[in-house]
Amino acid sequence: MDPRYVLRYPFLESSKEYVRDRGLSMEAIAADQYARVHELARGRIMDAIVGSEDPGALRGEVEERILSYPLARFVVAAVGDRNLVKWFAHREAEVSAGHLMEEDADFVLAVGKELGLEASAEGGAADAEARRVVKGVRPAGVDRMDAEKRVYWVTVTGYLQARQNISGPEWDLPNQRLVSGRIGLNRRRYVRLLQELMKRRIEAGLDQEASARGMGNLGRIIGQVRDMVESRRKAYKPASIGKVTITRMPPCMRQILGMAQSGENLPHHARFTLVTFLNSIGMPPEEIFKVFSTAPDFKEEIVRYQIEHITGQSSGTEYRVPGCDTMKSGGICYQPDTLCAREWMSSPYVYYRAKGRKDARKGEGSTS
Ligand code: SF4
């Protein structure tokens, strides 16, 4: 395989084979003569932790950069931190997806096939059908500005499987153009789905224990990475929102908050709902901001902008907490309990207020 592709897509089987053919064990790469590879691996991980905007910042010889990927994986596994695994997989997939946008269509299709989302991009009548403007509305999935003029056709099952963690109306099934049981996507959207699959592939195996005992330099790098993970956590330590407050939260919000705090990437509508809810119960924007700091796709400026927008600081419109019906149709009404079943239960905020009154009555009862 061309080493340039190994560099851009190190998670592909052919890339792994390329590295295997070098016949280098991890112990061998840990030796001092590979000090530059160590630095590159460390830089790669730091980039994932701090969210650098410049993937080209990691410079080195091609072979050194290629070896830095398996070494970085080894270090991430040895650190053994779930958030770090997510941050690393997210960043690596994001960078590779950026490259994939520039490749020729045959290569994109080959990557899609390997990742399990095979597409056909034949063009012709089906493409014309996908691009047809219906009642003045251009079908979702076909970008007006798509210079490639090609539609990538994927099966509905493959589409649903890949988009699990992507939300927003433009991804909802009813908004897709379906022709003969296949969904038509432009390159940008097809690659976005592949990015999710890349992330899953990169994550695979990183939860297995790895020990750097006796590997000299690597122990030092692992220590530095651990410190960096800790400082990101400390800098954006999720707010303690108080025991009483948490017990008043409805099951949906506890679930979403737990996902955010354990480093899961929240679907857009879950993130929106959590911000509106925390804002409605009086959490200051700065504390809401900290709740999202462990998300793999955390970008300080973007998160600040979103919170300021939703809480009305910058937009002048304070968005209200969505109702239970909306939550249900969005698939984020998690494990409703008996209080949720009351006929007047209309939103997570109503739940929170009702639970507060209930708890207060209990408190009065216990002191009398
Ligand atoms: S019923 Fe409403 S408050 Fe209860 S879990 Fe569902 S969305 Fe949340």
Image: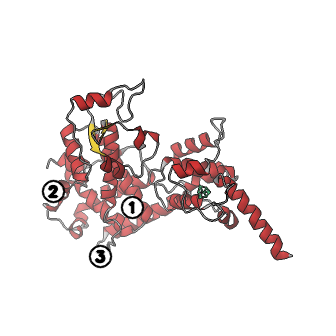
Q: Quadrant of residue 360?
A: bottom right
The reply to whether residue 324 is in sight is yes
Kind of residue indicated by mark 3: Gly
Q: Secondary structure at mark 1?
A: helix
Kind of residue indicated by mark 1: Val
Residue 214 got which mark?
3
Between disc 1 and disc 3, the foreground one is 1
Residue 29's spot in the image, x, y percent?
23, 65
| Residue topped by disc 2 | 18
Q: Quadrant of the C terminus?
A: bottom right
Q: Is residue 330 left or right of residue 250?
A: left
Badge 2: how crowded within 10 Å, few (<14), some, or many (20+)? Answer: some
Q: CA distance from mark 1 to mark 3?
A: 23 Å
Residue 179's spot in the image, x, y percent?
29, 37
Q: Are marks 2 and 3 in contact (CB under 8 Å)?
A: no
Q: Secondary structure at mark 2?
A: helix
Q: CA distance from mark 2 to mark 1?
A: 24 Å
Badge 3: how crowded within 10 Å, few (<14), some, or many (20+)? Answer: few
Between disc 2 and disc 3, the foreground one is 2
Q: CA distance from mark 2 to mark 3?
A: 26 Å
Kind of residue indicated by mark 2: Tyr
Q: Is residue 357 above or below residue 324?
A: below
Residue 76's spot in the image, x, y percent?
36, 64
Q: Please tell me which residue is depicted at 30% across the width and 50% down the height of the picture.
A: 158
Q: Quadrant of residue 239?
A: bottom right
